[in-house]
Image: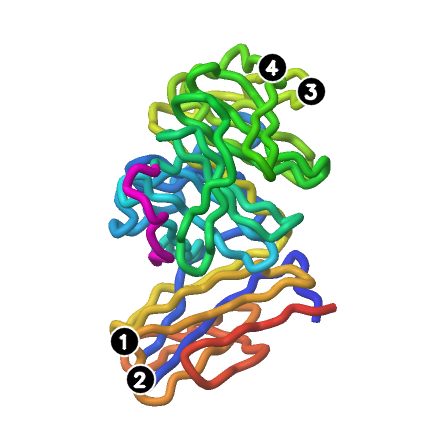
Amino acid sequence: MQLMNSNLTIAIIAAGFCLLAAPAAAQRLITVDSNRTVWDVNILNGVRTQVGTITANAATTGGFAYDIATGKQYLTSTSNDSLYVVDVTNWSSTLVGPYGSSAIVMHGLEWDPSTGTLYGMSSHDGGLYTINTTTGFAALVGTTGLTSFHNIGHDPVQNVMWMTNANTASLYSIDRATGAATLVGQLTGPTSPSGLAYNTDNQTLYLVCNFTDTLYTINTTTGVATAVGPVGSSNLLGLVYIPGNGRLTRASHGCGAMTIRVTGHPNTGFSIETTLGGSIGVPFVGDGLSSVGVAFCGGCTIGHDWLVAASGVSSKLEIEE
């Protein structure tokens, strides 16, 4: 089955409950403010458009990280000292678990696809951590010797983990085995770098600064940042690039209080995972390609062109050629 350049709609029905909801997309540069608002950022001019708000359980929101293999969007809370998974169809956050120390203030967060590892950077000790994606526990790899806030972004082309430091306003490469940081050069523009993301489509490292409120590209040879454009007054702390040509969508839900979490990447070679909560009766999950809006259960609508329907409270759809 080929889903490149297609929309994937997730439709859920269980004992008179139905859920369909609103769009979330791939191939985007996304940023999150400390106040939980989420924005699409135009990579050509820096203009941002609000696409949602993270649910309140995540408190003060910080770094973003995206695992393309599973389509999971990770989020760090700098006030709860915990890791969350975010559903990009409605921006609800689900707690994974605490980092294991209240001293940790994890602003930096990044997924390394070369080893399948989630990394974090804490400002309390300038340390690089590996994070358990099942429990949230953070294990120290090593310290950089630098103070203030750090952000990290993985470059899969060169297989390099880049890091910025707010105190020095500089770019570094970081050794993922020891935590040692090597200076590349000063950014010469951003004074409070607060989010890094690597665009695999144009092979460019992007940075957002929450002091100049500007989106930048970074020369990874010299460290010099070039302004793309202003993002507007904000406190943007996380930045992530979601590649691909597909879109993952849901319609708004009605006829009950059942919950749904959807993660995944709607492209060939990846999968879509759907999990229900609070269902009664005999639930099943339907995965389709479009929403047709058929009236169902006295007031709510269900739209689908199902490819597959699976019984139970969870379903994983593998997308193959």
- Circle 2 residue: 16
- Circle 3 residue: 221
For the residues carrying marks 3 and 1, which lies nearer the camera in this image?
A: 3
Q: Position of residue 206 (x, y in %)?
A: 56, 29
Q: CA distance from mark 3 to mark 1?
A: 55 Å
Give the magenta-colored segment's residue range.
94-104
For the residue marked with disc 2, what is the amino acid?
Gly
Of marks 4 and 2, which one's residue comes earlier in the chain?
2
- Circle 1 residue: 255
Magenta stretch holds residue 96: yes
Count residues near mark 3 (Cα–Cα under 10 Å), then give few for <14, some for 14-19, many for 20+: few
Q: Is residue 214 visible?
A: no
Q: Are marks 4 and 3 in contact (CB under 8 Å)?
A: no
| Residue pictured at 50% horizontal, 76% vertical | 315
Q: CA distance from mark 3 to mark 2?
A: 58 Å
Q: Position of residue 308 (x, y in %)?
A: 56, 80
Q: CA distance from mark 4 to mark 1?
A: 56 Å
Of marks 3 and 2, which one's residue comes earlier in the chain?
2
Q: Are marks 2 and 1 in contact (CB under 8 Å)?
A: yes
Q: Secondary structure at mark 4?
A: strand
For the residues carrying marks 4 and 2, which lies nearer the camera in this image?
A: 4
Residues 243 and 288: in front is 243
Q: CA distance from mark 4 to mark 3?
A: 8 Å
For the residue marked with disc 1, what is the amino acid?
Cys
Q: Is residue 100 above or below residue 182?
A: below
- Circle 4 residue: 185
Q: Are marks 3 and 1 in contact (CB under 8 Å)?
A: no
Count residues near mark 1 (Cα–Cα under 10 Å), then give few for <14, some for 14-19, many for 20+: some
| Residue pictured at 39% horizontal, 84% vertical | 283
